[in-house]
Amino acid sequence: MIEIHLRHRQGGFALDIDLALRAQGIIGLIGRSGSGKSTLFSCLAGHARPTEGCISLYGRPLYDSTRNLNVPPAQRGIGVVFQEGVLFPHMTVRRNLAYGARNTGTAFWHEVITALDIGALLGARPGRLSGGERQRVAIARALMAEPDLLLLDEPVSALDPGLKARTLDLIAKVQERTRVPMIFISHAPEEVRRLCGQVVTLQAGRVHSVTENGHPAPPYTYLPGPEARRCAR
Amino acid sequence: MFGLSPMEASALTLSLNASALAVLWSLPLAVGLGWLLGSRRFPGHALLNAVVHLPLVLPPVVLGYLLLVVFGRRGPVGSALEAWFGIRIAFSGAAVVIACAVVGFPLMVRAIRQSAEAIDPRYARAARSLGASELRIFLTVTLPLMSPGILTGITLAFARAVGEFGATITLAGNIPGRTQTLPLALFTVTQSPGGDAEAMRLCLLSLALAGAALLASEAISRRVQPGRALA
């Protein structure tokens, strides 16, 4: 389970999230600009420290304001993929993939490379890749670290429609093969519908709705338990 | 050497050696400070930035005098070095290196700082999410991405050090064969009757060195965009 129970204030913006999600498949996180998607992404990845609350992954606390606990990003076991890939420009694709990999050349290594169709790109530098190729390599690099959860922050929003559809299909394929749970953040409903079973919609910093395969989920299925609620007023 | 008189050859060698040593010794501190000023915000940031850049705006003779106050035989550092190790800094070859290092340092820090500022912070975030420690991120991501700025800084500081005059003559004097660098030798021959031809030779030599350094700096900055490592 991914349990999130947090309040975050940043300037005039307030994020107020209570969620307990089954960490499986690809979870969609959708909302308009300013709905709190990116702030929630930053809080989960550890780039921002929430004002109060707690976050846990499979029962492992990552952040707990009552215990002053804030696990550093490098130890969270959460992979991140940014909108533009953000590959290390001075390294080849192979070195980018190996950067966080526990082992190279394993069955998992080959599985990810094959599923994302980047085998031919291993010797290239990121500057020579197309936008779609960069995103596929960024997803592969994050997966090579074998994270417990992968956050994808609008990974296809900068791609043209043809590349977008192909990249979405490859994301679905690699998730199915590696079984790494993913949170797919987007502002485009059609992308999320194509990929995700569970979909969380944010509005003005709060959870507006949660759907399961297109049907509204009753609140008791996604609200955190008492242990998570304990850590925020 | 290349048709140069012994005095000219000695001045050229001393200038090149002192400038190279000055850059080499100040490089680690310049990289650290450039990175700190370019990628972190902390109380006293503006003050530290101003102190680092002070040698750029101070008259070189003032700088040389301040260095003499610190490193002279009665200065706090100079007297301690002489008492403990028997080392005299003022009017020695080491004084030339110190003067060159101090005048070139702000140029080096400035170039490195600008390079550090241009690095997208998401590179470090991506590396952290892959489990990398801060030291590993610095060595494998930040440092290579700062490399264009480091190389530009080295070139500019070297060029500035080769041309250094005021601080050197004040701290190191103008001793032929010992502390007489290229600009000091040029100054000396301009003061001597009939030294025009020699002065012109030294002048052209200085121009060639400075021009080569600036061309190298320009070539580096054109080859690489800010925030991108050397390929």
Image: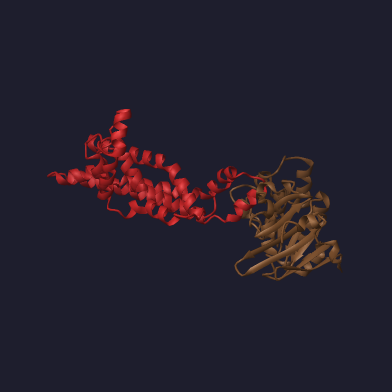
Residue A162 in sight from this viewpoint: yes
Of B172 and A54, the residue lying toward us: A54
Residue A172 spot, x, y in % from top left: 81, 57
What is the tally of numbered marks visible in this picture? 0
Residue A99 spot, x, y in % from top left: 66, 44
Residue A170 in sight from this viewpoint: no
The relative height of residue A61 versus residue B88 in the rendered view (above or below) is below
**What residue sits 75% from the left and 53% below the top?**
A56
Of B217 and A55, the residue lying toward us: A55
Of B19 and A126, the residue lying toward us: B19
Residue A152 spot, x, y in % from top left: 72, 58
From the image, state the color of chain B.
red
Q: Quadrant of the N terminus of chain B?
A: top left
Of A178 and B202, the residue lying toward us: A178
Along the horizontal axis of the image, is A12 left or right of B87? Answer: right
Residue A91 spot, x, y in % from top left: 61, 47
**What residue sits 35% from the left and 50% below the top?**
B211
From the image, state the color of chain A.
brown
Quadrant of residue A36 in the image?
bottom right
Quadrant of residue A159 in the image?
bottom right
Along the horizontal axis of the image, is A177 left or right of A157? Answer: right
* Colour mode of the rendering: by chain
